[in-house]
Image (spheres, helix red, strand yellow):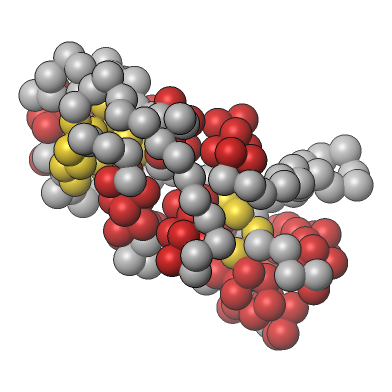
Amino acid sequence: ARAACRVLEAAGYRVHFNRAPQERPLCCGRTYLASGQVDKAKAEARRTLDHLLPFVERGVSIVGLEPSCLLTLRDEFLRYGYGEDAKALAKASLLFEEFLVRERDAGRMLLALKPLETPRVLLHGHCHQKAFDALRPVEQVLRWIPDLEVRTIETSCCGMAGSFGYEREHYEASMQMAELALLPAVRQAKAGDLVVADGTSCRHQIHDGAQRMALHVARVLERALA
């Protein structure tokens, strides 16, 4: 979050961190959905809607860093029966890299970036990014960095899938999924290569399975700020 804030501010934007008036932070509710607690997920969605709508009504973009969370606002929130409120929030909600691409394409942003010490990035796409065709913006913003080669690893799910890979009974299946393509590709990476994965669970799987620290794209862009 700190890296994303630095990049957005360097691009000329004022960043408001979303804080709920209650003590407990806002939540997209996906953790409840993953365990079948639909009513609790809907309640979290309503709480989030009520807090974010005043910003949406003023034309403020809602920018998220974790694909599974942000894209819940664009998908599941529309299925809960919250009508125009949910549609308005979905329209205003963008992943960090989607926001940057939109603003640059519209001529509203110029982000000065310098070459990195590393010549190559290996990119793993989160399942929700791939399902929503939202991986291409990550590739685009990485290619804004001068002299950087971007290689997208052709993978399916990393195998972690939220809490799935943490559960004892799913461990072997989780690791088999990771070993299909992701972990072998990461192990073959050169020492100077960066591994990029926006998904928190993806980064944990890469760390535990290949002993490599993967970075969110915001942290890579932060390193490249001129």
Q: Nearer the viewer, residue 65 or 27?
A: 65
Q: Residue at x 30, y 58 (%)?
A: 136
Residue 216 visible in the displayed image: no
Q: Residue furthest right?
A: 21
Query: Dividing the picture into quarters, in which one does residue 121 lie?
Result: top left
Q: Quadrant of the C terminus?
A: top left
Q: Nearer the viewer, residue 208 or 13?
A: 13
Q: Residue at x 21, y 35 (%)?
A: 147
Q: Is residue 142 shown left or right of residue 183?
A: right
Q: Residue at x 19, y 27 (%)?
A: 119
Residue 97 visible in the displayed image: yes
Q: Nearer the viewer, residue 10 or 89?
A: 10
Tell me residue 87's x, y (percent). 64, 80
Tell me residue 48's x, y (percent). 75, 59
Query: Dividing the picture into quarters, in which one does residue 208 lie?
Result: top left
Q: Quadrant of the N terminus?
A: top right
